[in-house]
Image: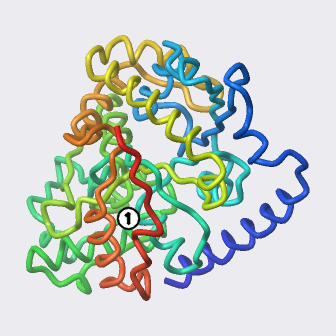
Amino acid sequence: MRSRMMLFSLMLITILMLVACNEDETESKDARESTTNDEKETVSIMLDWYPNAVHSYLYVAQEKGYFEEENIVVTFQFPANPTDPLTLAASGKVTMGLYYQPDVIMAKANEDIPIKAVAAVVREPLNHVVYREDNPIHSPKELVDKKVGYPGIPINEALVKTIVEHDGGNYDELEMINVEFELGSSLISEQVDAVSGMFVNHEVPLLRSQGYEVDYINPVDYGVPSYYEVVAVTSDETWENNQETIKAFWRAARKGFDDMIDNPEEALDILLSNQDEANFPLDKEVETESMNILLPKMKSEAGFANQEKESWEVTAKWLKEYGLIDEVPNIDDLIISIEP
Protein backbone atom coordinates (compact mmCIF):
# COMPACT_ATOMS: atom_id res chain seq x y z
CA MET A 1 0.00 0.00 0.00
CA ARG A 2 2.90 2.34 0.81
CA SER A 3 4.31 1.94 -2.71
CA ARG A 4 0.93 2.79 -4.23
CA MET A 5 0.63 5.92 -2.08
CA MET A 6 4.18 6.99 -2.96
CA LEU A 7 3.36 6.53 -6.64
CA PHE A 8 0.28 8.74 -6.38
CA SER A 9 2.13 11.37 -4.35
CA LEU A 10 4.78 11.60 -7.04
CA MET A 11 2.02 11.65 -9.66
CA LEU A 12 0.31 14.57 -7.92
CA ILE A 13 3.56 16.55 -7.70
CA THR A 14 4.13 15.96 -11.40
CA ILE A 15 0.63 17.12 -12.26
CA LEU A 16 0.94 20.30 -10.19
CA MET A 17 4.23 21.16 -11.89
CA LEU A 18 2.74 20.54 -15.33
CA VAL A 19 -0.34 22.61 -14.55
CA ALA A 20 1.86 25.49 -13.42
CA CYS A 21 3.81 25.32 -16.66
CA ASN A 22 0.60 25.11 -18.62
CA GLU A 23 -0.61 28.41 -17.19
CA ASP A 24 2.17 30.19 -19.09
CA GLU A 25 0.77 29.20 -22.47
CA THR A 26 -0.65 32.17 -24.32
CA GLU A 27 -3.15 30.45 -26.55
CA SER A 28 -6.44 29.94 -24.73
CA LYS A 29 -8.58 26.85 -25.20
CA ASP A 30 -11.64 29.06 -25.60
CA ALA A 31 -10.02 30.70 -28.61
CA ARG A 32 -9.33 27.32 -30.16
CA GLU A 33 -12.96 26.30 -29.69
CA SER A 34 -14.10 29.38 -31.60
CA THR A 35 -12.14 28.64 -34.76
CA THR A 36 -14.00 28.59 -38.04
CA ASN A 37 -15.01 25.41 -39.80
CA ASP A 38 -12.13 25.90 -42.24
CA GLU A 39 -9.63 25.55 -39.39
CA LYS A 40 -9.04 22.13 -37.93
CA GLU A 41 -8.87 21.41 -34.22
CA THR A 42 -5.86 19.46 -32.99
CA VAL A 43 -6.34 16.49 -30.68
CA SER A 44 -3.39 14.79 -29.02
CA ILE A 45 -3.90 11.38 -27.48
CA MET A 46 -1.27 9.51 -25.52
CA LEU A 47 -1.50 5.75 -25.89
CA ASP A 48 -1.01 3.47 -22.91
CA TRP A 49 1.96 1.90 -24.72
CA TYR A 50 3.47 1.73 -28.18
CA PRO A 51 1.04 0.87 -31.02
CA ASN A 52 -0.38 -2.64 -30.84
CA ALA A 53 -3.63 -4.42 -31.67
CA VAL A 54 -5.71 -2.58 -29.07
CA HIS A 55 -5.01 0.70 -30.88
CA SER A 56 -5.95 -0.52 -34.37
CA TYR A 57 -9.25 1.40 -34.47
CA LEU A 58 -7.38 4.68 -34.02
CA TYR A 59 -5.02 4.06 -36.91
CA VAL A 60 -7.92 2.88 -39.09
CA ALA A 61 -9.76 6.13 -38.34
CA GLN A 62 -6.63 8.07 -39.20
CA GLU A 63 -5.90 6.11 -42.38
CA LYS A 64 -9.45 6.34 -43.70
CA GLY A 65 -9.86 10.04 -43.01
CA TYR A 66 -12.56 9.76 -40.35
CA PHE A 67 -10.82 12.31 -38.11
CA GLU A 68 -10.43 14.65 -41.07
CA GLU A 69 -14.16 14.32 -41.77
CA GLU A 70 -14.75 15.61 -38.24
CA ASN A 71 -12.48 18.57 -38.92
CA ILE A 72 -9.81 17.46 -36.47
CA VAL A 73 -6.13 16.63 -36.75
CA VAL A 74 -5.04 13.82 -34.43
CA THR A 75 -1.52 13.22 -33.15
CA PHE A 76 -0.52 10.05 -31.32
CA GLN A 77 2.01 10.12 -28.49
CA PHE A 78 3.66 7.30 -26.56
CA PRO A 79 4.49 7.36 -22.83
CA ALA A 80 8.02 7.64 -21.52
CA ASN A 81 6.76 6.56 -18.07
CA PRO A 82 3.79 4.31 -17.21
CA THR A 83 1.81 7.12 -15.55
CA ASP A 84 2.30 9.65 -18.39
CA PRO A 85 -1.10 9.14 -20.05
CA LEU A 86 -2.84 10.05 -16.80
CA THR A 87 -0.56 12.82 -15.58
CA LEU A 88 -0.20 14.57 -18.92
CA ALA A 89 -3.92 14.38 -19.63
CA ALA A 90 -4.74 15.70 -16.15
CA SER A 91 -2.36 18.63 -16.63
CA GLY A 92 -3.69 19.47 -20.09
CA LYS A 93 -0.43 18.65 -21.85
CA VAL A 94 -2.32 16.17 -24.03
CA THR A 95 -6.01 16.21 -24.88
CA MET A 96 -6.58 12.63 -23.74
CA GLY A 97 -4.68 9.65 -22.43
CA LEU A 98 -5.42 5.93 -22.41
CA TYR A 99 -5.18 4.48 -18.93
CA TYR A 100 -6.66 1.82 -16.63
CA GLN A 101 -10.00 2.14 -14.85
CA PRO A 102 -8.88 0.98 -11.37
CA ASP A 103 -5.92 3.37 -11.45
CA VAL A 104 -8.14 6.24 -12.59
CA ILE A 105 -10.44 5.59 -9.63
CA MET A 106 -7.49 5.47 -7.23
CA ALA A 107 -6.08 8.71 -8.63
CA LYS A 108 -9.41 10.44 -8.12
CA ALA A 109 -10.16 8.94 -4.71
CA ASN A 110 -6.70 9.21 -3.16
CA GLU A 111 -5.35 12.41 -4.73
CA ASP A 112 -8.42 14.14 -6.18
CA ILE A 113 -6.63 14.46 -9.50
CA PRO A 114 -8.76 16.63 -11.86
CA ILE A 115 -9.69 14.04 -14.48
CA LYS A 116 -12.73 12.71 -16.28
CA ALA A 117 -13.10 9.40 -18.09
CA VAL A 118 -14.71 9.93 -21.49
CA ALA A 119 -14.63 6.46 -23.07
CA ALA A 120 -14.30 2.77 -22.22
CA VAL A 121 -12.06 1.09 -24.79
CA VAL A 122 -11.53 -2.42 -23.38
CA ARG A 123 -14.50 -3.46 -21.28
CA GLU A 124 -13.05 -6.46 -19.42
CA PRO A 125 -9.83 -7.16 -17.51
CA LEU A 126 -6.85 -8.24 -19.58
CA ASN A 127 -4.75 -8.88 -16.47
CA HIS A 128 -5.01 -12.63 -15.89
CA VAL A 129 -3.16 -15.07 -13.65
CA VAL A 130 -0.86 -17.04 -15.95
CA TYR A 131 0.80 -20.39 -15.29
CA ARG A 132 2.82 -23.03 -17.14
CA GLU A 133 0.84 -25.92 -18.56
CA ASP A 134 3.43 -28.38 -17.20
CA ASN A 135 2.59 -27.06 -13.73
CA PRO A 136 -1.18 -26.59 -14.09
CA ILE A 137 -3.33 -24.62 -11.69
CA HIS A 138 -6.90 -25.74 -12.11
CA SER A 139 -8.46 -23.20 -9.77
CA PRO A 140 -7.21 -20.26 -7.65
CA LYS A 141 -7.18 -22.16 -4.34
CA GLU A 142 -4.38 -24.29 -5.83
CA LEU A 143 -2.16 -21.19 -5.61
CA VAL A 144 -1.93 -21.82 -1.87
CA ASP A 145 1.65 -22.85 -0.90
CA LYS A 146 2.88 -21.61 -4.31
CA LYS A 147 4.93 -18.60 -5.42
CA VAL A 148 3.10 -15.94 -7.41
CA GLY A 149 5.12 -13.27 -9.19
CA TYR A 150 3.79 -9.75 -9.69
CA PRO A 151 5.21 -6.35 -10.71
CA GLY A 152 5.08 -4.81 -7.24
CA ILE A 153 1.73 -3.10 -7.88
CA PRO A 154 -0.83 -3.50 -5.07
CA ILE A 155 -3.80 -4.05 -7.40
CA ASN A 156 -2.27 -7.38 -8.38
CA GLU A 157 -2.16 -8.40 -4.74
CA ALA A 158 -5.84 -7.47 -4.41
CA LEU A 159 -6.66 -9.44 -7.55
CA VAL A 160 -4.90 -12.60 -6.36
CA LYS A 161 -6.36 -12.31 -2.86
CA THR A 162 -9.86 -11.94 -4.30
CA ILE A 163 -9.72 -15.00 -6.52
CA VAL A 164 -8.04 -17.22 -3.92
CA GLU A 165 -10.51 -16.32 -1.17
CA HIS A 166 -13.47 -16.57 -3.56
CA ASP A 167 -12.33 -20.12 -4.35
CA GLY A 168 -12.06 -21.06 -0.67
CA GLY A 169 -8.31 -20.78 -0.27
CA ASN A 170 -6.21 -18.93 2.33
CA TYR A 171 -4.36 -16.03 0.69
CA ASP A 172 -1.89 -15.83 3.60
CA GLU A 173 -0.58 -19.28 2.72
CA LEU A 174 0.82 -18.31 -0.70
CA GLU A 175 3.91 -16.21 -1.39
CA MET A 176 3.67 -13.06 -3.48
CA ILE A 177 7.06 -12.22 -5.02
CA ASN A 178 7.85 -8.85 -6.56
CA VAL A 179 9.57 -9.71 -9.84
CA GLU A 180 9.24 -6.15 -11.16
CA PHE A 181 8.40 -6.45 -14.87
CA GLU A 182 10.21 -9.75 -15.43
CA LEU A 183 6.90 -11.59 -15.41
CA GLY A 184 7.45 -13.82 -18.43
CA SER A 185 11.05 -14.72 -17.66
CA SER A 186 10.33 -15.47 -14.00
CA LEU A 187 7.47 -17.79 -15.01
CA ILE A 188 9.36 -19.62 -17.74
CA SER A 189 12.50 -20.01 -15.63
CA GLU A 190 10.33 -21.54 -12.86
CA GLN A 191 11.26 -18.90 -10.29
CA VAL A 192 7.53 -18.64 -9.65
CA ASP A 193 4.57 -20.94 -10.21
CA ALA A 194 2.26 -18.27 -11.63
CA VAL A 195 2.20 -14.55 -12.31
CA SER A 196 -0.32 -11.75 -11.94
CA GLY A 197 0.04 -8.63 -14.07
CA MET A 198 0.48 -10.34 -17.43
CA PHE A 199 -1.92 -9.25 -20.15
CA VAL A 200 -3.77 -12.05 -21.88
CA ASN A 201 -3.86 -10.19 -25.19
CA HIS A 202 -0.12 -9.65 -25.49
CA GLU A 203 2.25 -11.51 -23.17
CA VAL A 204 0.34 -14.79 -23.46
CA PRO A 205 0.31 -14.89 -27.30
CA LEU A 206 3.94 -13.75 -27.28
CA LEU A 207 5.06 -16.57 -25.00
CA ARG A 208 3.10 -19.10 -27.04
CA SER A 209 4.67 -17.83 -30.26
CA GLN A 210 8.06 -18.49 -28.66
CA GLY A 211 7.10 -22.10 -27.99
CA TYR A 212 6.14 -21.85 -24.32
CA GLU A 213 2.94 -23.58 -23.25
CA VAL A 214 1.04 -21.38 -20.84
CA ASP A 215 -2.54 -21.00 -19.73
CA TYR A 216 -4.40 -18.62 -17.45
CA ILE A 217 -7.18 -18.00 -14.95
CA ASN A 218 -9.66 -15.23 -15.72
CA PRO A 219 -10.11 -13.29 -12.45
CA VAL A 220 -13.67 -12.33 -13.40
CA ASP A 221 -14.62 -16.00 -12.92
CA TYR A 222 -13.59 -15.75 -9.26
CA GLY A 223 -14.99 -12.58 -7.75
CA VAL A 224 -13.01 -9.79 -9.40
CA PRO A 225 -15.38 -7.24 -11.01
CA SER A 226 -15.36 -7.06 -14.78
CA TYR A 227 -13.67 -3.68 -14.73
CA TYR A 228 -12.72 -1.66 -17.79
CA GLU A 229 -9.09 -2.45 -18.55
CA VAL A 230 -8.49 0.58 -20.81
CA VAL A 231 -10.32 3.90 -20.65
CA ALA A 232 -9.69 7.36 -22.10
CA VAL A 233 -9.26 10.27 -19.70
CA THR A 234 -9.05 14.03 -20.05
CA SER A 235 -8.72 16.88 -17.57
CA ASP A 236 -11.70 18.70 -16.12
CA GLU A 237 -10.52 21.89 -17.83
CA THR A 238 -9.91 20.25 -21.19
CA TRP A 239 -13.40 18.74 -21.13
CA GLU A 240 -14.96 22.08 -20.21
CA ASN A 241 -13.24 23.88 -23.07
CA ASN A 242 -13.12 21.17 -25.75
CA GLN A 243 -16.25 19.06 -25.38
CA GLU A 244 -17.30 19.21 -29.01
CA THR A 245 -13.83 18.36 -30.25
CA ILE A 246 -13.60 15.33 -27.94
CA LYS A 247 -17.04 14.17 -29.04
CA ALA A 248 -15.95 14.53 -32.68
CA PHE A 249 -12.87 12.42 -31.94
CA TRP A 250 -14.95 9.55 -30.58
CA ARG A 251 -17.43 9.71 -33.46
CA ALA A 252 -14.51 9.13 -35.80
CA ALA A 253 -12.96 6.49 -33.54
CA ARG A 254 -16.23 4.54 -33.54
CA LYS A 255 -16.15 4.43 -37.33
CA GLY A 256 -12.62 3.09 -37.08
CA PHE A 257 -13.75 0.40 -34.66
CA ASP A 258 -16.68 -0.58 -36.89
CA ASP A 259 -14.20 -1.09 -39.72
CA MET A 260 -11.94 -3.06 -37.38
CA ILE A 261 -14.86 -5.38 -36.65
CA ASP A 262 -15.87 -5.73 -40.30
CA ASN A 263 -12.36 -6.26 -41.65
CA PRO A 264 -9.85 -7.14 -38.91
CA GLU A 265 -7.19 -8.20 -41.42
CA GLU A 266 -7.24 -4.79 -43.07
CA ALA A 267 -7.14 -3.11 -39.65
CA LEU A 268 -4.14 -5.22 -38.70
CA ASP A 269 -2.32 -4.29 -41.90
CA ILE A 270 -2.94 -0.61 -41.16
CA LEU A 271 -1.62 -1.09 -37.63
CA LEU A 272 1.50 -2.89 -38.81
CA SER A 273 2.25 -0.05 -41.23
CA ASN A 274 2.14 2.35 -38.27
CA GLN A 275 4.12 0.32 -35.75
CA ASP A 276 7.09 1.78 -33.90
CA GLU A 277 9.66 -0.71 -35.13
CA ALA A 278 12.53 0.88 -33.24
CA ASN A 279 10.91 0.61 -29.81
CA PHE A 280 8.16 -1.99 -30.11
CA PRO A 281 8.27 -4.12 -33.26
CA LEU A 282 5.15 -6.16 -33.84
CA ASP A 283 4.78 -9.83 -34.77
CA LYS A 284 1.85 -10.30 -37.14
CA GLU A 285 0.94 -13.70 -35.69
CA VAL A 286 0.93 -12.36 -32.13
CA GLU A 287 -1.10 -9.27 -33.06
CA THR A 288 -3.61 -11.41 -34.97
CA GLU A 289 -4.24 -13.54 -31.89
CA SER A 290 -4.31 -10.40 -29.77
CA MET A 291 -6.99 -8.86 -31.95
CA ASN A 292 -9.09 -12.02 -31.77
CA ILE A 293 -8.93 -11.80 -27.97
CA LEU A 294 -9.60 -8.07 -27.86
CA LEU A 295 -12.54 -7.64 -30.20
CA PRO A 296 -15.16 -9.35 -27.99
CA LYS A 297 -13.85 -7.37 -25.01
CA MET A 298 -14.16 -4.05 -26.85
CA LYS A 299 -17.69 -4.48 -28.22
CA SER A 300 -20.68 -2.88 -26.53
CA GLU A 301 -24.35 -3.19 -27.39
CA ALA A 302 -24.69 0.48 -26.46
CA GLY A 303 -21.94 1.46 -28.90
CA PHE A 304 -18.16 1.33 -28.86
CA ALA A 305 -16.55 3.36 -26.06
CA ASN A 306 -19.83 3.74 -24.16
CA GLN A 307 -19.44 3.79 -20.38
CA GLU A 308 -21.76 2.34 -17.77
CA LYS A 309 -21.85 3.95 -14.35
CA GLU A 310 -22.37 0.56 -12.68
CA SER A 311 -18.94 -0.65 -13.81
CA TRP A 312 -17.29 2.32 -12.12
CA GLU A 313 -19.32 1.88 -8.93
CA VAL A 314 -18.68 -1.85 -8.61
CA THR A 315 -14.96 -1.46 -9.31
CA ALA A 316 -14.64 1.38 -6.82
CA LYS A 317 -16.36 -0.67 -4.11
CA TRP A 318 -13.96 -3.55 -4.77
CA LEU A 319 -10.95 -1.22 -4.49
CA LYS A 320 -12.30 0.10 -1.18
CA GLU A 321 -12.95 -3.41 0.15
CA TYR A 322 -9.31 -4.33 -0.45
CA GLY A 323 -7.90 -1.12 1.00
CA LEU A 324 -6.72 0.58 -2.19
CA ILE A 325 -8.99 3.58 -1.62
CA ASP A 326 -10.54 4.97 1.55
CA GLU A 327 -13.72 6.33 0.01
CA VAL A 328 -15.60 5.80 -3.25
CA PRO A 329 -15.28 9.01 -5.30
CA ASN A 330 -18.24 10.80 -6.87
CA ILE A 331 -18.71 8.69 -10.00
CA ASP A 332 -21.01 11.26 -11.64
CA ASP A 333 -18.16 13.77 -11.45
CA LEU A 334 -15.63 11.27 -12.74
CA ILE A 335 -17.22 9.94 -15.93
CA ILE A 336 -18.71 11.48 -19.05
CA SER A 337 -21.17 9.65 -21.28
CA ILE A 338 -20.62 10.45 -24.94
CA GLU A 339 -23.54 9.18 -26.95
CA PRO A 340 -22.75 7.07 -30.06
Q: Residue at the location (46% across, 36% down)? A: 250
Q: How is the image coloured?
A: rainbow
Going by the image, does 130 lie left or right of 180?
left
Q: Residue at the location (69% across, 32% down)? A: 42
Q: Residue at the location (68% across, 72% down)? A: 12
Name the foreground residue: 229 vs 28: 28
Name the foreground residue: 200 vs 238: 238
Q: Amino acid at mark 1?
A: Gly
Could you tell me residue 158's position as x and y percent?
A: 33, 75
The image quadrant that residue 105 belongs to is bottom left
Going by the image, does 315 lie left or right of 223?
right
Q: Vertical placement of 175 versus 71: above or below?
A: below
Q: Vertical placement of 292 versus 120: above or below?
A: above
Tell me the quarter of the image containing the C terminus: top left
- Circle 1 sits on which residue? 149
Q: Residue at the location (26% across, 17% down)? A: 262
Q: How many marks?
A: 1
Going by the image, does 24 lie left or right of 93?
right
Could you tell me residue 44's position as x and y percent?
A: 65, 38
Going by the image, does 91 lie left or right of 8?
right
Could you tell me residue 47's position as x and y percent?
A: 56, 41
Could you tell me residue 67's position as x and y percent?
A: 55, 23
Q: Vertical placement of 151 versus 141: above or below?
A: above
Mark 1 packing: few (<14 Cα in 10 Å), some, or many (20+)?
Answer: many
Element under label 1? strand
Name the foreground residue: 325 vs 2: 325
Name the foreground residue: 138 vs 101: 101
